[in-house]
Image (cartoon, rainbow, N blue to C red):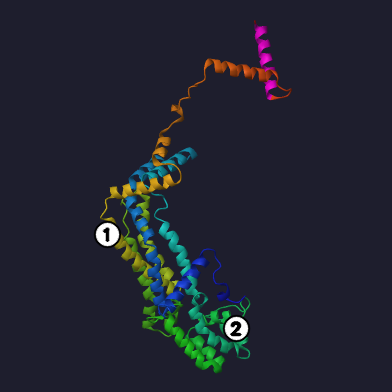
Amino acid sequence: MYGLLATASTTPIIAQIAWIIGKLMDWIYTTLGVHNIGWCIIILTVIIYTLMIPLTIKQQKFSKMSAMMNPEIQAITKKYANKKDQVSMEKQQAEMQAIYEKYGTSPMGGCSGLLIQMPVLFGMYAVIRNVPAYVDSVKQMYMPLVDQIMATDGFRKIMEGIGTVKPVLISADKFDYTHANTLIDVLYKFQNSTWDTLVDKIPSISSIATTTQQSLEHINNFFGINMAEAPLTMFQNALHPFSIGMIILAVIIPIMAGVTQFASVKLQPQQSTDPDNPMANSMKSMMFTMPLFSVFMCFTLPSGLGLYWCISAVVRCAQQIAINKYLNTKTTEELFEENQKKAAKKREKKGTAAKEITQMAKTSTRTVEPKKSTMTDKEREEKLKAAEKYTKNAKAGSLASKANMVRSFNSGSDKDDK
């Protein structure tokens, strides 16, 4: 294998999203001239969430509509609380679906934003974990040093000795250390002490190694925080030797992630405080669990991903304030009517108008009357004679001949009875 640069992410959807994110980041780096990964992440985050504004509006509307739907949903839940048979569960599901259709929404209406955010988050993780694999401009910064290393006799053994131990930990059994991509993977994970080790092992590359290290520090360093390094690693390094400044830098992004996530959840339209309302209880618990999860996640993953998480929460807060202000200009009745009109259009696109669906729903098989025949007596008599003639001339073994046998048997039975 040639290293992570050769394979990158191969997970379906995530791989494509990571590729797009990498191209966008490379465009920001080269075209906009933003030669810092931290600022590239901030600009990229603003672009992503600007494109997601329609989904955010839809999610906020769903939260508003939920306040109207919840009393009816709770009533159905209580109605079928002690009924676990299949028929009752199907009826409950049908009644629930009828309520969602009535309000022009769906049970997944509040999840659409999350369904988009998660693949983007995983794609962003793949990019930040190995920026040179996706951002070609950054990869090219390593190439002069890699060329010098590969021109050194015995470079493979030297690089394997450095790369197979902490902090790099890239196995020589799985990755080919004679390939440039693998060496770039190794160099991307270097820390200050690792650079010193490289220069000690290969003194002839001292000058270009120092130049490359300084250039990489410039693009990866965001106010003293290495975007490729996890805050947990920074915290551990700050303990030996002890450094208050490094500890503050290590914890600042996780703390910001928790605070901004709490603000984002708090700004969402709040549900009813009814203790029997499971959705309200879920939102209440999420208000505290999500910030704690954010702190943990941003403490253990690369700082660049934590920065993306923080900025995305800040952008969401700004969007939610603006969207809430817009939605507050409309009554819930107006939102209800808008949703009904949109739902009606969707149904009509599928081939059935809303009025027809309503009429069909009201139709019962018990009230359907059989159609009256318009055939005259003469026409009926002619059809009967034709059918009788057909059955008399039926072939042996046919269904018509068997019908004749049954008729003859019945006729004989009638005569015997007489």
Task: Report x, y in % for residue 191.
Answer: 48, 83
The image quarter containing residue 268 is: bottom left
Tell me which residue sits at (46%, 30%) in the image.
365
Q: What's the magenta region?
A: 399-417
191 magenta-colored? no
Observer able to see residue 317: yes
Give the quarter of the figure containing the N terminus.
bottom right
Q: Which residue occupies the foreground of this view, 411 or 113?
A: 411
Task: Report x, y in % for residue 259.
Answer: 34, 68
| Mark 1 to mark 2 CA distance (whole Å) | 58 Å
User: What residue is pinned by disc 1?
Assistant: 325
User: What residue is pinned by disc 2?
Assistant: 160
The image quarter containing residue 186 is: bottom right
Tell me which residue sits at (28%, 47%) in the image.
333
Identified by mark 1, the residue type is: Lys
- Seen as rendered, the residue at the extreme bottom is 204
Identified by mark 2, the residue type is: Glu
Tell me which residue sits at (57%, 89%) in the image.
148
Secondary structure mostly seen in the magenta stretch: helix
Task: Report x, y in % for residue 132.
Answer: 51, 78
Mark closest to the chain's N terminus, 1 or 2: 2
Observer able to see residue 235: no
Q: Residues within 10 Å of mark 2 (few under 14, many from 20)?
A: many
Q: In this image, 356 relative to 413: left or right?
A: left
Total label count?
A: 2
Q: Which residue occupies the foreground of this view, 220 or 390?
A: 390
Which element carries disc 1, helix, strand or loop? Answer: helix
Q: In this image, 153 relative to 362: left or right?
A: right
